[in-house]
Amino acid sequence: NAVLAHDTVCFGSTALPLHHNVDSILGGAKIGTDTRYRWISSVDGGSSWETAGGADSLNASFVPMSMETTTVFSRVVKSGVCDDTSNQITITVLPAIENNEISQDTILCFGQTPDELIGTKPAGGDAALFSYKWEVADLITGPYTEEATTQHYAPSFLEESKFYRRVYYSGIHDACRDTTNILTVEVLPLINNNQLVASDDTMVCQLDALPG
């Protein structure tokens, strides 16, 4: 009666299904003709247990509901007058990511280099395991491609408007992920046709008005 597997999720996310370890064959008692399951959970490290919440808490496999607290799960199998409790599986819940923000929109002239795009250091997730990904697109709807993997980003000079966003990943297997607002760098075309037109020479006396 062995189950899989440990998992790490972000606050409010659903963990992967918990299921029987296929390398461990369930047997004994009247398994096969009389098998009953009950998933149990503990939010205090295994000191106290209760029937796990969810519609499938009496099934062989179990999908944890939206997770808000690190929880230990185990499966009780009953067959005939016998019962057995499986190994324990821990679903670690990381705090939700907060304060993932980047600079405000800006306007440039053609060929100018924008100031460095500044991003905050987010809170939440796993403070020891995180990464950044700056993405850019020609249209606000995308597609977006990766530009940099630093907290801040300094684009090169621009010839057309671009849209930027930053994705923040944290935790094992990027359990937590959050995408910032979209930042617009608008590039205006150069001013053209700013020319003076020469006219016929005109001579006037001092204080006289020029001809209209």
Image (cartoon, rainbow, N blue to C red):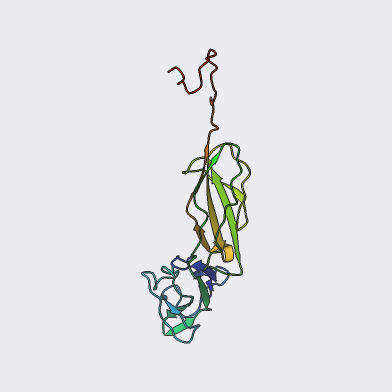
| Residue 198: quadrant of the picture | top right
Q: Is residue 199 left or right of residue 57?
A: right
Vertical placement of residue 156 versus 63, above or below: above
Of 199 and 89, which appears nearest the observer?
A: 199
Residue lying at 53% horizontally and 31% vertically, measured from the top left: 191
Of 30 and 156, which appears nearest the observer?
A: 156
- Furthest toward the left, the residue is 55
- Furthest toward the top, the residue is 200
Residue 152: image location, x then y, percent: 60, 56
- Furthest toward the bottom, the residue is 47
Residue 12: image location, x then y, percent: 43, 67
Of 121 and 62, which appears nearest the observer?
A: 121
| Residue 127: quadrant of the picture | bottom right
Residue 19: image location, x then y, percent: 49, 69
Residue lying at 50% horizontally and 43% vertically, measured from the top left: 142
Of 152 and 137, which appears nearest the observer?
A: 152
Vertical placement of residue 110 versus 173, above or below: above
Residue lying at 62% horizontally and 50% vertically, measured from the top left: 154
| Residue 1 can be seen in this image | no
Q: Is residue 36 left or right of residue 46?
A: left
| Residue 129: quadrant of the picture | bottom right
Residue 173: image location, x then y, percent: 58, 62
Q: Where is the C terminus found, in terms of image quarters?
A: top left
| Residue 24 can be seen in this image | yes
Looking at the rendered structure, the number of numbered marks drawn on it comes to: 0
